[in-house]
Image (cartoon, rainbow, N blue to C red):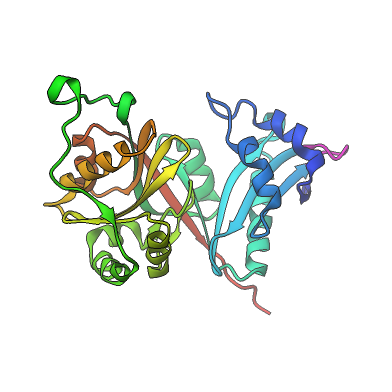
Amino acid sequence: MPFLTRPATETDRAAIRDLTRHTFSWGDYVMRNWDEWMADPAGTMLVAVDTEDIAIGLTRISMLSSTEAWVQATRVHQEHRRQGMAHQLVDEAIEWARDRGATVARLVIEDWNSASIGHVERLGFRKVSDWMMAERGVGDSSPVPEGNGGQRVRGAERLRPAPGAEADPAFMSWQRSPLARAARGLFPPRGWRWRALEVDDLRESARASEFLTGRPGWAIGGVSNDTFEVRWVETSPDDAYDLARSLVDAASDHPVERLEAKLVDVDWLTQAFRRVGCKLSGLHVFERAITRPIE
């Protein structure tokens, strides 16, 4: 028997807070994003409700482009699990995206979460690319003091803001690279969401002074709260270490506590970031084709 579902409303806030309080050892990200998600015209949150209209399940979907949807935050109350609620919520969310032109839906799962991986595979998602989250402290939080009196020695290579005119050559270089092939053309524009990279993303990053260039290659990186986030890189096996070191230096130029880079899992790239003191954790991006019903 299908569950009752509807779009989330502000009256669901308390129930969703209770539902997500212990999702992970550190809590959950749902309530941190609640206000933004409720106000987002490009997305919706669906809730499953009990007979008293209390939310007992949740999923969130948003349009990242005219054809790409992103699924996240699928949660089910522990007393209602293994009854098909998550499957129904995701299917209905994908129907919402289909009505808005989406042809593909994606999501990301950490590689240790075998239960969630098995679940999304049963929902029709397939893994399309492997990623690594690379993290390390910078500045006073740096775990790698080097050189003079414990102060980190800067690399010889420095990155600088790239002009928009470099967007086309950088994009063409990346399209021909093993990084683009391994990424299946995807990148994370903001936060934990992936979509196809377009050359306009590089131009937009240049306008924000977040498109960086130097002898070792190009990157998109900028400050978000206390973190310097790297969202895209283009480099070569010979230059990857120098680029990684340059990005640590770039992060150290800002009042941030850490560097965070989402990297496609190509060994020579991830090992370069490991060499500069980053801890690595694995991620998988999954996708599901959205087909039109036969009329």
Vertical order, 55 against 70 (above or below): above
The residue at the point 28 percent across, 43 percent down is 250
Count how many numbered circles sit on residues in the image.
0
State yes or no: residue 197 in magenta: no
Which residue is at the far top? 149
Residue at image point 43% right, 63% down: 204
Residue 94 picture location, percent across and down: 63, 59
Main SS of the magenta part reads loop
Who is closer to the viewer here, 185 or 288? 185
Q: Residue at x 54, y 60 (%)?
A: 64
Q: Is residue 281 above or below residue 175?
A: above
Name which quarter of the figure residue 182 lies in: bottom left
**Residue 80, percent from left and from top:** 71, 34
**Nearest to the observer: residue 251 or residue 271:** 251
Is 46 left or right of 246, judged from the image as shown? right
Magenta segment: 49-55
In this picture, residue 201 sits left or right of residue 152: right
Q: Is residue 237 left or right of residue 232?
A: left
> In this view of the protein, can residue 84 be seen by the observer?
no
Name the outermost residue toward the right. 52
The answer to whether one can see residue 155 in this image is yes
Up/down of 21 relative to 162, above or below: above
